[in-house]
Image (spheres, helix red, strand yellow):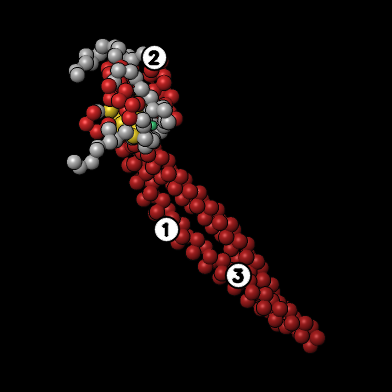
């Protein structure tokens, strides 16, 4: 039966037909919204990765600064020790008494040990600075790569979202045309069922079962559905039911 595509549906058969179109359109809309959300989520994940990389680089840089500061301090301390050594050596040349000579020599020995320790510290810090610089250079290169990747993704996504939004607006307009053909109460009930049933508010009856919830239905009930003389909802899941004589009933099996 071909119904006028804009007239208000009055008979149950027309209403279920319009509900089927509404369901098909809502499936389309949902798919669009899912894809749209997936796009946005993807971009959001990429943004998080970038932000994490940036924090990581900043952390490394501040550690480098700290290490460089330590290196300067230790180098100054080393210089001071060397100055002291030079002064002691000078002092040693002017020493005449053996007691004093021993004392200065002891002082020099202690300074030598201190210098050794300090030198070792300075070398380790210099090595750490080199390592930090290398790590930062690598992280910065990775960051630049991901960042330009994200910029491309950002632009692509914005363009795709514009297309998707236009498509959604167009489908929403089509939806309005369809819902205008139905009684508000029917649309509201359809929407309530759809919300409760994962978006599926209409289901065909096949082999005496509601394909929405898979529950078996009474043959007399199936007959009402097939006849289409009234708008019928599944007693188990509330979905609007429709059916065709060809497959609504259980086949009697091979003759
Ligand atoms: Zn059902």
Q: Which x, y percent locates residue 54?
A: 47, 48
Q: Mark on residue 248?
A: none
Residue carrying label 3: 121
Front residue (pair 250, 80): 250
Task: Nearest to the eye among marks 3 and 1: give it.
Answer: 1
Question: To which residue does mark 2 refer?
Answer: 184
Distance from label 3 to label 1 (Cα)? 26 Å
The answer to whether any part of residue 201 appears in the image is no
Q: Is residue 24 left or right of residue 96?
A: left
- The answer to whether the residues at label 2 and label 1 have Cβ atoms under 8 Å apart is no
- In the image, ligand 1 is in what quadrant? top left
Residue 180, percent across and down? 32, 14
Q: Is mark 1 within 8 Å of ligand 1?
A: no
Find residue 74 and report its horizontal and vertical position in percent: 62, 65
Q: Are marks 2 and 3 in contact (CB under 8 Å)?
A: no
Pointer 1: what residue?
A: 138
Q: Residue 191: name its quadrant.
A: top left
Is ligand 1 within 8 Å of the beta carbon of the residue shown at mark 2? Answer: no
């Amino acid at each position: 039966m071909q119904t006028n595509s804009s007239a208000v549906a009055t008979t149950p058969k027309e209403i279920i037909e319009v509900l089927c179109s509404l369901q098909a359109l809502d499936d389309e809309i949902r798919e669009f919204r899912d894809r749209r959300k997936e796009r946005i989520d993807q971009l959001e994940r990429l943004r998080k990765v970038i932000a994490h990389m940036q924090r990581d680089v900043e952390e490394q840089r501040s550690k480098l600064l700290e290490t460089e500061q330590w290196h300067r301090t230790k180098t100054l301390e080393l210089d001071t020790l060397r100055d002291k050594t030079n002064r002691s050596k000078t002092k040693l040349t002017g020493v005449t008494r053996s007691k004093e000579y021993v004392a200065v020599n002891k002082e020099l020995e202690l300074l030598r040990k201190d210098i050794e320790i300090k030198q070792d510290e300075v070398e380790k810090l210099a090595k750490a600075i080199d390592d930090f610089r290398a790590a930062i250079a690598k992280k910065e290169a990775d960051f630049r790569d991901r960042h330009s990747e994200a910029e491309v993704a950002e632009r692509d996504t914005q363009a795709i979202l514009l297309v998707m939004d236009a498509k959604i607006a167009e489908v929403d307009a089509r939806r309005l045309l369809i819902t205008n053909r139905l009684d508000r109460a029917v649309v509201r009930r359809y929407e309530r069922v759809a919300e409760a049933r994962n978006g599926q508010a209409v289901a065909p009856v096949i082999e005496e079962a509601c394909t929405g919830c898979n529950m078996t239905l009474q043959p007399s009930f199936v007959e009402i559905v097939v006849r289409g003389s009234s708008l019928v909802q599944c007693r188990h899941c509330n979905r609007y039911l429709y059916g065709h004589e060809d497959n609504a009933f259980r086949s009697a099996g091979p003759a």
